[in-house]
Image (spheres, coloured by chain):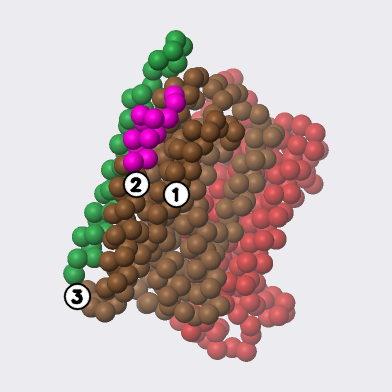
Chain colours: A brown, B red, C green
């Protein structure tokens, strides 16, 4: 199957590029003076967070399109994006605390970023659980679409409330986390990492989509 | 549409209040929780005002979950949902009717819970009563609206009682947090301007999600 | 490294390892699931 083959190739390339980014980030990117090497966790945490959010957004979008156009392909895509998104959000959820501990001194805090990561993960989890719990394929697709759309709409609220919380309750800043204005080399590493994560997302989704097709052709016993 | 919704809500509420079991359990539960929290804390260690908002909202949330769990249970048990769907009323009326019934249920529990809360925790609420009621109303509408939509979907699944809270969790926590923060600000006597930020978020959330639920509900019951 | 820079490489390594494990792991899982079932 062509989709599967292409997906596998893209994933393979993505993994090789990931190794390259690793080398660049670990060995060839300067260490941040005040945060130390742990700051480099950013280069995997931020791209995974962005891709997770993108995945959720696409799940929601696929849901809207499915309900409007009744095309099963959108449902398959939503299913794929949700599973892949879950994987990335696990990366996000694990690297977050690992980064927080040395930088903020605690594994967890109900701060903006970490809270958002948890929510995103819960949304994906809920989506997958709902799909698992509904047996009728027509219902499954429609319910997933509904949930996906609600999840998508929820994201801006989470961002907003996180922003509002910050302005009302200024956080004591122990070590200032990397500001968006990163020096050139660091920014480059971050962008490269982001591109690689997107490549991986695409490869994964293609394979997962292909898997749905395979399952439909030859249903499991 | 409103009339249909109202009839539906009345039907649900009449069933509820005739049997009284659900509403009584919810009220008793609220009283229990408030009492336990009250006796469980050390008055000298923690000021009531600090803990109070969270406790209040925990009890209200449980009451809401109780209501939502039962929301579509009734129809499901008696295959009544098909009958409802065949009737010449719009799908949205069904949603609105369910929503109203659930809201009345939760509001009743809250109406009992709030004075008890003020009593047990010796918290003065009269001076901020209007704002407090606004916060409670807005937050309740928020999670009941989403909850009613989701309960339509989970009603037919296995483990419905388990699935609904899991699905609902990411949608309930933001309004809950905003409500707790607003309540805390109000009870602590902070100027109203601090609470308005959260109130606006709550209002925005309500408008967006009630509308969204209206739009999406037909997708959950159409063939 | 210059003086005063925190010595927290262990966390960096941990995060990078975890990320690699998850991403490679998922790739492997997908690969195996799509081998004609």
Determine the CA span between mark 2 and mark 3.
Answer: 38 Å
Q: Secondary structure at mark 2?
A: helix
**Which of the two residues, A29 or A75, is positioned nearer the viewer here?**
A29
Residue B26 in view in this figure: no
Whether callout 3 and callout 1 share a subunit is answered: yes
Q: According to the image, label 1 marks what residue? A: A195
Does label 2 or label 1 sit earlier along the sequence? Answer: 2
Q: Give the image location of residue B215, x and y in percent.
A: 62, 72
Q: Residues within 10 Å of mark 2 (few under 14, many from 20)?
A: some
| Nearest to N terminus: mark 2 or mark 3 | 2
* Residue pictured at 55% horizontal, 83% vertical: B84
- In the rendered image, residue A170, in percent from the top left (x then y), is placed at 66, 29
Specify whether B89 is left or right of B26: right
**Which range of residues does the magenta coloring cover?**
A20-31
State which chain disc 1 sits on.
A
Which secondary structure, mark 1?
helix
Which residue has dot 3 on it?
A221
Secondary structure under tag 3 reads: loop
Q: Is residue A214 magenta?
A: no
Q: Is residue B130 left or right of B158 when viewed as pictured? A: right
- Percent x, y for residue A183? 55, 30
Residue ID for mark 2:
A17
Main SS of the magenta part reads helix
Query: Which numbered disc, 3 or 1, marks the residue closer to the eye?
Result: 1
Alpha carbon distance from label 2 to label 1: 9 Å
Q: Residue at x 29, y 67 (%)?
A: A4
Q: Chain of mark 2?
A: A
Sooner in the amino-acid sequence: mark 3 or mark 1: 1
Circles 3 and 1, Cβ within 8 Å, touching? The answer is: no
User: What's the distance in space between the residues labelled 3 and 1, CA to CA?
Assistant: 39 Å
Labels 2 and 3 positioned on one and the same chain? yes
């Amino acid at each position: 199957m062509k989709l599967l083959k292409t997906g596998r190739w893209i994933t393979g390339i993505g993994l090789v590029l990931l190794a390259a980014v690793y080398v660049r980030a670990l060995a060839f990117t300067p260490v941040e003076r005040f945060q130390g090497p742990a700051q480099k966790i950013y280069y995997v945490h931020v791209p995974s967070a962005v891709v997770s959010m993108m995945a959720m957004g696409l799940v929601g979008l696929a849901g809207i399109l499915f309900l409007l156009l009744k095309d099963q392909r959108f449902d398959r895509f939503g299913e794929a994006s949700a599973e892949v998104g879950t994987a990335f959000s696990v990366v996000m959820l694990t690297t977050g605390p690992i980064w927080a501990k040395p930088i903020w001194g605690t594994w967890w805090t109900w701060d903006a970023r970490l809270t958002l990561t948890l929510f995103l993960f819960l949304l994906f989890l809920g989506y997958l659980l709902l799909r698992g719990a509904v047996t009728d394929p027509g219902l499954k697709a429609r319910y997933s679409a509904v949930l996906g759309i609600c999840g998508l709409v929820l994201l801006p609220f989470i961002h907003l409330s996180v922003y509002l919380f910050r302005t009302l309750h200024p956080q004591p800043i122990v070590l200032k986390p990397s500001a968006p204005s990163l020096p050139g080399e660091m920014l480059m590493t971050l962008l490269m990492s982001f591109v690689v994560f997107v490549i991986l997302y695409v490869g994964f989704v293609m394979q997962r989509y292909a898997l749905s097709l395979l399952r439909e052709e030859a249903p499991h016993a | 549409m409103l009339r249909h919704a109202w009839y539906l809500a009345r039907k649900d509420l009449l069933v509820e209040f005739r049997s009284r079991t659900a509403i009584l359990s919810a009220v008793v539960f609220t009283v229990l929780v408030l009492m336990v929290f009250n006796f469980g804390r050390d008055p000298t260690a923690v000021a009531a005002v600090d803990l109070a908002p969270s406790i209040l909202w925990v009890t209200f949330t449980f009451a809401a979950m109780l209501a939502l769990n039962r929301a579509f249970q009734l129809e499901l048990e008696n295959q009544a949902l098909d009958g409802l769907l065949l009737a010449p009323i719009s799908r949205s009326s069904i949603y609105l009717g369910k929503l109203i019934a659930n809201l009345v249920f939760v509001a009743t529990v809250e109406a009992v819970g709030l004075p008890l809360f003020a009593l047990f925790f010796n918290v003065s609420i009269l001076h901020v009563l209007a704002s407090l009621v606004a916060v409670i109303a807005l937050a309740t509408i928020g999670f009941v609206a989403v909850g009613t939509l989701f309960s339509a979907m989970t009603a037919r699944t296995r483990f419905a009682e388990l699935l609904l809270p899991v699905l609902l969790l990411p949608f309930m926590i933001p309004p809950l947090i905003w409500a707790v923060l607003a309540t805390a600000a109000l009870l602590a006597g902070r100027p109203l301007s601090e609470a308005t930020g959260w109130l606006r978020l709550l209002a925005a959330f309500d408008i967006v999600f009630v509308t969204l639920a209206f739009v999406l509900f037909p997708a959950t019951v159409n063939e | 490294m210059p003086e005063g820079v925190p010595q927290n490489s262990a966390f960096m390594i941990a995060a990078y390892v975890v990320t690699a494990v998850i991403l490679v792991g998922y790739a492997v899982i997908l690969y195996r699931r799509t081998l004609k079932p």
